Amino acid sequence: MMKKQEFVPRKISEKPLYELKSVEDIPVSELYQVKINGKEQRVYHTEFFDFVSFLDENDKAEVEVTVNEPFQKAVIRPAAAQIPFEEEGNKISISLPAGKRITLELDDKLESPLYVLPGKYIPKPENATYVFESGKAYNVGCLQLNSDETVYIEYGAVVSGRIYSRMADRVRILGNGILYGGNWHAWDENGAEQLIVPVLGENIEIRGITLLDGGSWHIVPVACKNVLIEDVNVLGKVITGDGVDIVGCENVVLRNCFIRANDDCISIKAVEFQDPSGCTDVKHILVEDCLFWNAEFGNTLEIGYETRCDEITDVVFRNCDVVHCQYEGNQSGGVLTIHNADRAHVHDIVYENIRIEDAQEKFIDIKTLDSKYSRDRERGMVNDIFFKNIEITEGTFPVSIIRGFEMKNEVCRPHGFYFDNVVIHGKKVMSPGELHMVVELSDELKFQ
């Protein structure tokens, strides 16, 4: 690692279970072998998924997957992409357009998919402060960044640790390598700190890298302005392992990312994270062109629960594919969700051009409520929520809920919900009943 200034690694949590000696310390798949354009690739393994990442070099990649166990049926998602593939014996041949991330599932087994993750090459900036070189493993503890500093993780490099900044502007974390958290917690436990946390910064850029197996939330901008998260893979597998938590931020763009999380894939909130700075208004958030897999816990696209600010507004989720939102069974577990558990006025939220292939628990779940996460003494309002061109194509027909809040001295009635071309299993829904929706203490639901 080349660096312009020295830093002292510090331990996250207590201590790592082990330090990475080499990239070989991350297990490889015994189920899948993958060739890209005839070249053998390293396929990484976790207890819940395998994945291969590679650099796009042409307009199309010829992907050959060899499966080392018998199978009957292969499915490639997102289905809307209509990726052509052929099966011959235990081999699956896929013609993959440049930049198109996919999941491969065998015999409907959700515990052993293969994620195929092409990425755009990110060249090394001339002024990079820290450069982590391909083929090497690094243990950085907590790498703290100052203004105008850049971290570059080359393709083939693995960095174990956490990247943090406070009141640092123009921070960049770039590359095509891996930021790894799996050696800080037992395989089936959470407990490590978050992987990337910029606090009170402006003009933050996170681009190209893969975050793997963090023990908690993976990317957490807090009270930041002008944040770009682009072409990033977040592959989490522990409970509370949120993908991206946007906390008290303004002007955030999250684009062309793949997030597999065993908790919220995206969570937008205002909370005392690190310090009270996170309890600021949230405005102008755009999430677009992303692929999501929400495992058993949490929600896919969430606002809440912690909403300890005055206003959360102008949030747009656009042109995204949800391949799975698995069953949670703990009153949460939805695809498009708002849980306003504090005082914020949540309004002008847009869900547009979203394709959902599997929603096992709830489709829409919007509540004003008092929860175990609440701190404010009064509840906030939810209004002017727009659903346009939303489709559930497969799986069960999930329920939906919109619910207000009423106590002796307080009534909060969410209102202004607009449904434009919402289609479930090929049928456009035109009423709450057709949507299998429970509506309580809420007003003004309009279908067109």
Image (cartoon, rainbow, N blue to C red):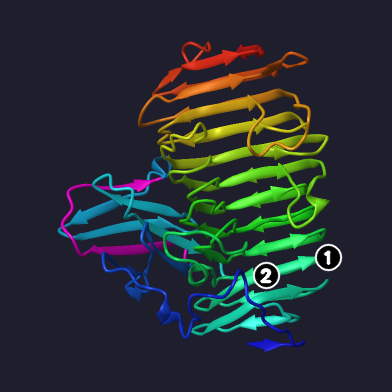
Q: Is residue 37 above or below residue 24?
A: above
**Residues packed near mark 2 inside 10 Å, few (<14), some (14 to 19) or many (20 plus):** many
Q: Amino acid at mark 2?
A: Ile
Q: Is residue 232 above or below residue 381?
A: below
Q: Which numbered circle lies on residue 169?
A: 1
* Depth order, front residue of 40/151: 151
Image check: 191 left or right of 268? Answer: left
Is residue 74 within the magenta segment? yes
- Give the mark toward the camera: 1 or 2: 2
Whether residue 264 appears in this view of the structure is: yes
- Residue 25: which quarter of the image? bottom left
Pinpoint residue 99: horizontal percent, then vertical percent: 50, 58
Q: Amino acid at mark 1?
A: Asp
Question: Which element is circle 2 on?
Answer: strand
What distance separates the C-alpha of mark 1 from that of mark 2?
A: 14 Å
Is residue 4 within the magenta segment? no
Q: Is residue 277 above or below residue 125?
A: above
Pinpoint residue 208: horizontal percent, then vertical percent: 59, 65
- Residue 26: which quarter of the image? bottom left
* Region rendered in magenta: 57-77
Q: Which numbered circle lies on residue 163?
A: 2
